[in-house]
Image (tube, rainbow, N blue to C red):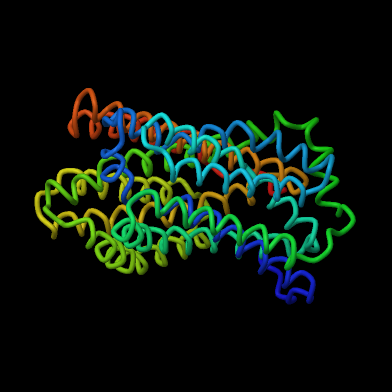
Amino acid sequence: MLAKEPFNAEERRAVLGLASLYCLRMLGLFMVLPLFAVYAQELTGANAASIGLALGAYGLTQAALQVPLGWLSDQIGRKPVILGGLSMLVVGSLVAASAETLTGLVVGRLLQGSGAIASATMALAADYTRIEQRIKASAIIGASIGVSFALALVLGPVLAAWGGLPRVFEVTAVMGGLGLVVVLFWLPATPQLSDAGRAHIADRDRLGEALWGRGLGIMYASIFCLHLLLMAAFTAIPSVMTYQVGLDPIHHAWLYLATLCGALPGVAVLVRRRDQAGDPRSLIMLTIVLTVAGLVAALWSVSLALLGVGLVLFFTGFTALETILPALVSMFAPTSLRGTAMGIFSSAQFLGVFAGGALGGNALHFGGAWWLVGTLLALTLLWLGAVWRFGRAPAVAY
């Protein structure tokens, strides 16, 4: 339940700053999605497999470093880790902007991902806020990620039309620099470690419960599969828009904007149903089906109308799941394990980013769109079965 009591002045300033930080960081990372598969073809060594690998590369270092950097933030403080992570985002973006080969682009993406500060940032949000305000703070920060995703799909093609892929990475570096300004000059002084922060340290002895607790494992698997679908989709959708449908890349932003707006009513209905559902399995499965049906329709599109319908369905399912899954993790996890569970959740998400880029690129390279669709449908069947088998809410409320 969200606390009805408002934030105090320090909490309000901290949550606004952290939400802005998330939005700046994720906006830069998301902007490459709708254009990468088209513009990266100009680089030496480009093919479908290498482009997919480069697209998902930042997810590999993100997944690998979330937990270690979260631990480091417990030892030396949150802000030094966040500042270091933002600095790596700036460096990686500049390397990617100057890359003339796919190998150089992969190096830049890996460096971008090494700024894995999600767990440290969420821990800092817990440190700044009272326990009863923590879920509200997480919801606001999560909403900023959704806003950044929507903005990125529109701004990315506009920037690329102005200056190509390098311009997008240059703007990402600028956003990383603005994030440094937010941390240094906007966020309040770091508070003494709260009870939530102490629990985050102590709970490492209960890591198994956080990993495999009733209902949690399938939530981690679901966010992994969801972001795998997202990245696999964007190894192919920009090319579908350009070559199958004949839409000039300069107009891609307007199609994304229109379909995102078209998805909003469906997202609102699905998210509202989450609050009314005692057993979340049917809602999750319905949303998965919408996501995959939209993706398949988009990948097989030969007309703008079919592509638009597919993207509306895809964005409806994806955005709803992106909202529902972290809320379920916070509900399923014991109170003292929520921080640890969200760290694992973030790692699974970014591992899905890497796997989706690599899988999508290789499927396109070796078998084309039919092979990609077949692979994703097989994954979806396994995902649906796992949700039905393991997706019940815990019998005991924590």
Residue 94 locus on image (x, y percent): 51, 46
* Position of 209 relative to 197 (above/below): above
Residue 189 locus on image (x, y percent): 84, 63
Q: In the image as oriented, which residue stretches furthest toward the right?
A: 192
Q: Nearer the viewer, residue 38 or 374?
A: 38
Q: In the image as oriented, which residue stretches furthest toward the top?
A: 366
* Position of 129 relative to 234 (above/below): below
12 with respect to 264 (left or right):
right
Q: Quadrant of the N terminus?
A: bottom right
Q: Quadrant of residue 203?
A: top right
Residue at image point 59% right, 41% down: 345
Total numbered labels placed on residues in the image:
0
346 with respect to 156 (left or right):
right
102 with respect to 64 (left or right):
left
Q: Nearer the viewer, residue 341 or 110?
A: 110
Q: Nearer the viewer, residue 195 or 163?
A: 163
Residue 238 locus on image (x, y percent): 25, 48
Residue 249 locus on image (x, y percent): 22, 56
Residue at image point 52% right, 40% down: 349
